[in-house]
């Protein structure tokens, strides 16, 4: 089973990364999502820059998370934490792009029928295709996060603020919510790809699933939502449940009979 | 499994899609080593039949056994024993020939993949271009590679859906010769085709489908069943009484006169022809040429589908 899944993953990467759009999405999106917060920190990385601010400039519910930090450091920590959701966009966008091109590509070139005539199981195909999207997305997110954390270490003068980047909130977000979001992106792409014949259309429709993440980002900046440890944990639980349900539907859609008789 | 032992058996196999019947009550038996043709117009159910037997679709009713395994129960075992060339080659254009075949070798869990790849690519004349992306291949090369893919795991049964469709005459010939070679190796081949000449040349038996089974037999038997055996006598001149005289002879059926030719349905030409020729000569006819009128499989096909327009080929 593992050999087949591995072969599918490698085949997917060989095929899909030859597409320039996919390659640039996978390569540059995480780069931008990492460079952007680092640039912000470069310009505002010293809490001295926030010496004039008071705790009142930070959403009141966030102040609780700051603990013993002073007003300037608390503001800096608030700034640093804003990017947590930026890093969650990468694991949604990257697998959505890869899976959309992979599945719609197989549909248009009619390569699924000979593949499905082999002893490979539906689950193996789906896991293979899923991992081909999830692995680069998760790796890109993790690498981006490590680069960001390393950059923050160099740019932010207060080590207490930097250490906050390794608190349970960030760890849960990057190492649990990120992969769960990737899986969501793959399942959604499979379902949408079964109904469309253009990978760009599949990608755009799947992009609708980005809206809640963007909504969280906006909600957090405006102070409407507080993304704290409790919130991120509930988010992880919700995503895990959603992933199970969506993956179940994706498996149903990916049955041989359905693909050959209903996928148009 | 011995030759002539059934390798595919279907009993009232039926497939419906949203209330539309694609294949109805298909019952047939295909023997080991047989080249079996599935003929029929578009939408006749040929591809659906292949997909059913390849365990890609679930039957709505009926049963089937492929390579000794029951369809629906042992699908994975069936898939290990069959090779499929679908209507579209379905190759990964961005991958090389070697990568395409290696990927499928992995799907079948094969051990000696490089050796198998080399064998088939050399056999099909693709070895020199093995590392080039398949997207740069001609249609004929792609079809050959798709055949190699279907054979990489040495299947007992090979399903070929329109293997020469859209190929130029040279590529068509190469593919046909390769299929003939596979037949000589004793592989069971199920051939779906619109090309009746191809079916006539390659198939031991053919099934004519139009949703249901219209006819099933060897092409020669189908000809005989539908048209009998006909002998044509080319004469210098046809005059009255010749046809009537022939019709009275034993073993002779209907006799027609077409210009300077007499067309006679004869039970066994090898036995009855001398008497017919003698009768013609005794009645003053000058016989220039005698041959058996061989109906093309196309005539049989059109007759079965009720689309007869008629076309004849004479053969010595």
Image: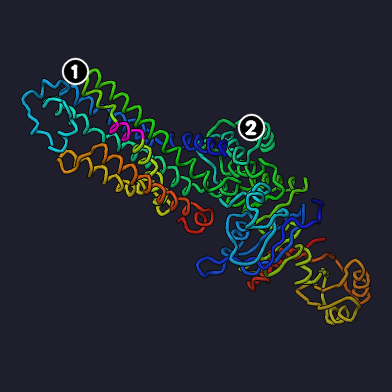
Q: Is residue A254 left or right of residue A201?
A: right
Instruction: Mark yes or no: residue B198 visible.
Output: no
Residue sitting nearer the eye, B15 or B130: B15
Q: Which residues are magenta?
A: A168-175
State whether the magenta stretch is mostly helix, strand or loop. Answer: helix
Q: In the drawing, what numbered circle is on residue A157? A: 1
Identify the residue under disc 2. Answer: B127
Say if the magenta span includes residue A169: yes
Q: Residue furthest left?
A: A52
Q: Residue at x 17, y 29 (%)?
A: A67
Q: Is residue A101 left or right of residue B33?
A: left
Residue sitting nearer the eye, B242 or A159: A159
User: What x and y, as percent, mark residue B219?
Assistant: 75, 62
In the picture, residue B204 is in which quadrant? bottom right
Residue sitting nearer the eye, A114 or B125: A114
Residue sitting nearer the eye, A127 or B308: A127
Chain label for disc 2 = B
Q: CA distance from mark 1 to mark 2?
A: 62 Å
Say if the magenta span includes residue A232: no
Task: Give SS at disc 1.
Answer: loop
Q: Is residue A243 left or right of residue B228?
A: left
């Amino acid at each position: 089973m593992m050999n087949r899944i591995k072969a599918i993953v490698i085949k997917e990467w060989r095929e899909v990364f030859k597409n320039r759009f996919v390659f640039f999405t996978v390569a540059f999106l995480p780069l931008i999502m990492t460079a952007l917060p680092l640039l912000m920190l470069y310009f505002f990385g010293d809490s001295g820059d926030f010496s004039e601010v008071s705790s009142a400039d930070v959403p009141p519910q966030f102040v609780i998370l700051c603990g013993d930090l002073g007003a300037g450091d608390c503001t800096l920590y608030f700034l640093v934490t804003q990017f947590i959701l930026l890093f969650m966009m990468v694991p949604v966008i990257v697998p959505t792009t890869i899976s959309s091109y992979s599945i719609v590509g197989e549909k248009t070139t009619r390569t699924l029928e000979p593949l499905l005539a082999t002893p490979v199981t539906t689950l193996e195909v789906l896991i293979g295709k899923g991992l081909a999207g999830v692995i680069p997305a998760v790796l890109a997110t993790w690498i981006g996060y490590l680069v960001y954390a390393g950059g923050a270490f160099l740019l932010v003068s207060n080590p207490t603020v930097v250490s906050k980047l390794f608190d349970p909130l960030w760890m849960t977000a990057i190492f649990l919510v990120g992969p769960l979001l990737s899986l969501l992106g793959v399942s959604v792409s499979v379902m949408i790809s079964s109904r469309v014949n253009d990978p760009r259309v599949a990608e755009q429709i799947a992009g609708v699933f980005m809206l809640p993440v963007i909504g969280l980002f906006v909600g957090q900046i405006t102070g409407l939502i507080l993304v704290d440890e409790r919130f991120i944990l509930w988010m992880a639980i919700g995503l895990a449940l959603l992933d199970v349900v969506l993956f179940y539907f994706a498996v149903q859609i990916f049955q041989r009979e359905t693909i050959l008789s209903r996928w148009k | 499994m011995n030759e002539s032992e059934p390798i595919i058996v279907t009993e009232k196999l039926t497939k419906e899609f949203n209330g539309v019947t694609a294949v109805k009550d298909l019952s047939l038996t295909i023997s080991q080593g047989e080249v079996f043709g599935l003929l029929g117009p578009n939408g006749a159910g040929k591809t659906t039949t292949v997909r059913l037997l390849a365990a890609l679709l679930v039957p709505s009713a009926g049963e089937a056994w492929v390579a000794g395994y029951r369809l629906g129960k042992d699908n994975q075992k069936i898939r290990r024993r069959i090779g499929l060339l679908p209507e579209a080659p379905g190759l990964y254009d961005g991958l090389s020939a070697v990568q395409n075949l290696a990927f499928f070798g992995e799907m079948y869990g094969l051990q000696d993949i490089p050796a198998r790849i080399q064998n088939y690519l050399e056999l099909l004349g693709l070895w020199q271009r093995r590392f080039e992306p398949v997207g740069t291949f001609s249609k004929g090369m792609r079809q050959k590679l798709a055949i190699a893919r279907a054979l990489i795991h040495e299947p007992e049964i090979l399903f070929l859906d329109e293997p020469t469709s859209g190929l130029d005459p040279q590529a068509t010939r190469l593919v046909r010769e390769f299929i003939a070679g596979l037949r000589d190796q004793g592989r069971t081949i199920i051939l779906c085709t619109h090309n009746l000449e191809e079916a006539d040349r390659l198939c031991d038996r053919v099934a004519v489908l139009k949703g249901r089974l219209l006819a099933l037999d060897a092409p020669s038997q189908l000809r005989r069943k539908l048209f009998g055996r006909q002998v044509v006598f080319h004469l210098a001149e046809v005059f009255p009484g010749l046809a009537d005289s022939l019709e009275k002879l034993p073993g002779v059926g209907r006799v027609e006169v077409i210009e300077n030719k007499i067309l006679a349905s004869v039970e066994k030409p090898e036995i009855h022809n001398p008497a017919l020729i003698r009768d013609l000569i005794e009645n003053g006819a000058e016989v220039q040429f005698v041959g058996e009128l061989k109906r093309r499989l196309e005539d049989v096909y059109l007759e079965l589908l009720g689309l007869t327009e008629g076309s004849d080929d004479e053969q010595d």
